[in-house]
Amino acid sequence: MNEREFKGFGGITLRADVHGMSDDPSVLLLHGGGQSRDVWQPAAEALVKAGRHVINLDLRGHGASDWASDGRYDFEAFVEDIRAVLAQLASRPVIIGAALGGWIAAAALGEDGGHLASGLVLADAPPEIDAQTALKVSDQLRLQIERTDVQAQFDPAFLRSMDLEHATGRITEAAHLLKLPVLFVRGAMSDLADSELAGRYVEQVETAEFAEIEDAGHHVAFDRADMFSAVVLDFLERRVPRFLPDYKQGSDARTLRDALGCFATGVTVVTTMSEENEPVGLTANSFTSVSLDPPLLLVCIAKTSTSLKVLEQAKHFAVNVLHIGQQPVSNAFARSGEDRFADTPWQRGLRDAPLLSGALANFECERFALHDGGDHVILVGQVERAKYEPRRDPLLYFKGKYRRLHFA
Ligand SMILES: Cc1cc2nc3c(=O)[nH]c(=O)nc-3n(C[C@H](O)[C@H](O)[C@H](O)COP(=O)(O)O)c2cc1C
């Protein structure tokens, strides 16, 4: 086991225990308010045995992490800490959060569309906390403070800043946006989340499943560590497996698509003018530069594409590279049954091929070759003219989703 430091929101130092092999898929453990990473000890051991790399973090003002000198223990500060920690990890972990740890993870991941993690386990982290429950939580924590044995575990200033009502609003809104595998584990005897409430939450999160552990209360991961670990490991093996399926010729094409989707690309719209003098175009990310001398590029057009016929016949075509603001253009040129050029300003190029105005780059091409490419046709063009816009960022496409540039 090693200790690792992270920079949190506002430069605060957060400390974590790190267990297991760094090449294994990682799990980030977030304890509840008023606790420390110690509560996860049994779960961390079980996870490492099951081949997971575990990062067990102390939240700000808790355990070995720094106490906030500016007193920032509001929900936002905790959420920003988690975002900062996730940005410092080499891979996207499954987050397992108890109570406050779960709430901040649910808010951070929901608001980010879940791109920052590969799964989420909420250990008795009810999404709605009414005023009465909030009081109960604070009272329990105050009682803890009075007990000398846990006094050093957290900064008492944290209690004064907790705004669970604000948190509830954010978590509930974020629930609809969560798209990653979610498991909600409830202690059957928990006084915080009744089953009905937990059930409602699970219904809101499309990808969520629910497990209840008998004989466990609010501290479900601690009360019945054995049961908790078993339920979580089962979830991980099913929904975030250690070994991903591989593709062999003839096997599930989905896996092949997913593997190909690991290659990040830009997005283009390939255009031409039909013999009837109508503009034709479709979204394509299969664009590749081929040769500098002669200047060649290619795009692959599906044989099912209705634009293919016109493209095969046309002597000239253009490739328009889209910028970050042109996601609607990409969508419009990938949807059928609409006038794709109606809402997108364009003008004719040298040889009439439509050039989308404001694109990141336009390549005006003469058809150089057509090759058979299985269920696609490889269209190779010789570039007659190219221009580009130096001040804009590209629209990116990765694993079936649009992305934006992120400078590390
Ligand atoms: C990001 C993105 C990339 C695409 N890349 C290609 C591509 O490279 N080749 C292709 O044939 N279709 C591609 N498509 C799908 C076509 O744009 C889509 O099927 C379109 O409706 C075809 O139009 P058409 O049938 O009018 O030609 C892509 C779609 C999207 C959203």
Image: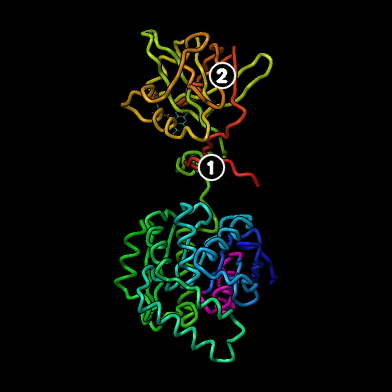
Q: Is residue 157 magenta?
A: no
Q: Residue at x 45, y 28 (%)?
A: 283
Q: Is residue 225 above or below residue 81?
A: below
Q: Is residue 19 visible?
A: no
Amino acid type for the residue under numbered disc 2: Phe
Instruction: Judge from the rendering whether residue 377 lies leftward or rightward of residue 64; answer left or right.
Output: left
Q: Position of residue 356 (x, y in %)?
A: 48, 21
Element on which disc 2 rests: strand
> Is 192 in front, or is 2?
192
Q: Quadrant of residue 126?
A: bottom left
Instruction: Specify which label sits upstream in the sequence, 2 or 1.
Output: 1
Residue 172 visible? The answer is: yes
Q: Which residue is mark 2?
A: 363
Left/right placement of residue 316 relative to residue 16 reads left
> Looking at the picture, how far across and down is residue 73, in whole percent?
54, 70
**Residue at the (38%, 25%) spot, across then down:** 343
Q: Is residue 187 above or below residue 102?
A: below
Q: How is the image coloured?
A: rainbow
Residue range highlighted in magenta? 32-53
Residue type at mark 1: give it.
Ala
In this figure, which residue is indicated by the disc labeled 1?
259
- Residue depicted at 65% across the width and 58% down the height: 23
Residue, far front = 70
Q: Quadrant of the N terminus?
A: bottom right
Spot occupied by residue 295 in the image (x, y as percentages of width and height): 64, 16
Q: Measured from the top left, where is residue 287 in percent x and y?
A: 55, 27
Residue 35 colored in magenta in the image: yes
Instruction: Give the quadrant of ligand 1.
Output: top left
Q: How many angstroms separate mark 2 from mark 1 (CA)? A: 29 Å
Count of numbered circles on the image: 2
